Amino acid sequence: MKIFIDTAEVSELKLIAETGLVDGVTTNPSLIAKSGRKIADAIAEICALIPGPISAEAVANDYDTLLAEGRFLAKIAPNVVVKLPLTPVGLKVCKTLSDEGTPVNVTLCFSAVQALLAAKAGATYISPFIGRLDDNGFDGMELIREIRVIYDNYGFETQILAASARTANHVRDAALAGADCATLPPAVFQALYKHVLTDLGLEAFMKDWAKTGQSIL
């Protein structure tokens, strides 16, 4: 499963990128606002840092403006993925951009039939929000499983990008359910390393090694 980082903070992204485990980045208007930067500048710097797909979101409500925004974002760097909302206008723009060869990430997906429409519109990625579904009493992981079955039934190439992940368990479950990618806040990415038995085992190994009085180098 591909791992994307959900952030617009370049400083923290640089540290995570050094692991060599990051496949891409997703941003949204809230993350851009939090960064305090102009979207074009932030996206350009992230695209230069991470060679994989970088999602940049268009925000207009009408077709012409949303399409113009998408085309503008796509010109920032060759690895930009235009992020669009799962609305009638968003899917119409998705179809246009996809036909032009621009990759699109359709976001704010909360049902399997929405995901079906996005795939038919040519979306490169569909972003079901598993955490938000769980927060509101739904089963986010069941949605991943439903989309996986539908896409496999009809040979859709749209990749399932599990979004709104809250915990390392969300990442595990999304991988088991067949998600192609997951996008994670930096804190959740760091949590993937953690297990109490790993920490205890390493502590025991280090104590035993110190007793030998040896140095490997």
Image (cartoon, rainbow, N blue to C red):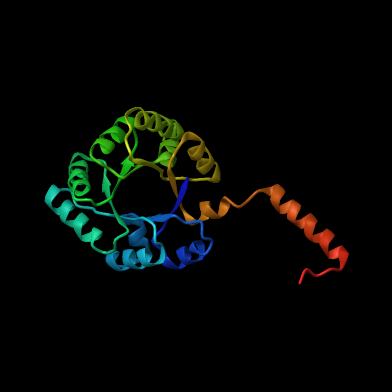
Residue 125 percent coordinates (x, y): 33, 44
Q: Nearer the viewer, residue 40 or 30?
A: 40
- Residue 62 horizontal side relative to residue 26, left or right: left
Q: Quadrant of the C terminus?
A: bottom right
Above/below status of 201 relative to 214: above
Coordinates of residue 135 in the picture (x, y in percent):
44, 38
Whether residue 71 is visible to the viewer of this picture, yes or no, is: yes
Q: Quadrant of residue 91?
A: top left
Residue depicted at x 35% and y 27%: 153
Q: Position of residue 174 (x, y in %)?
A: 48, 39
Whether residue 137 appears in this view of the structure is no
Residue 207 location, x and y as percent? 82, 60
Q: Residue at x 39, y 28 (%)?
A: 149
| x 47%, y 66%: residue | 14
Return the residue found at the far left.
Answer: 64
Residue 33, image quadrant: bottom left
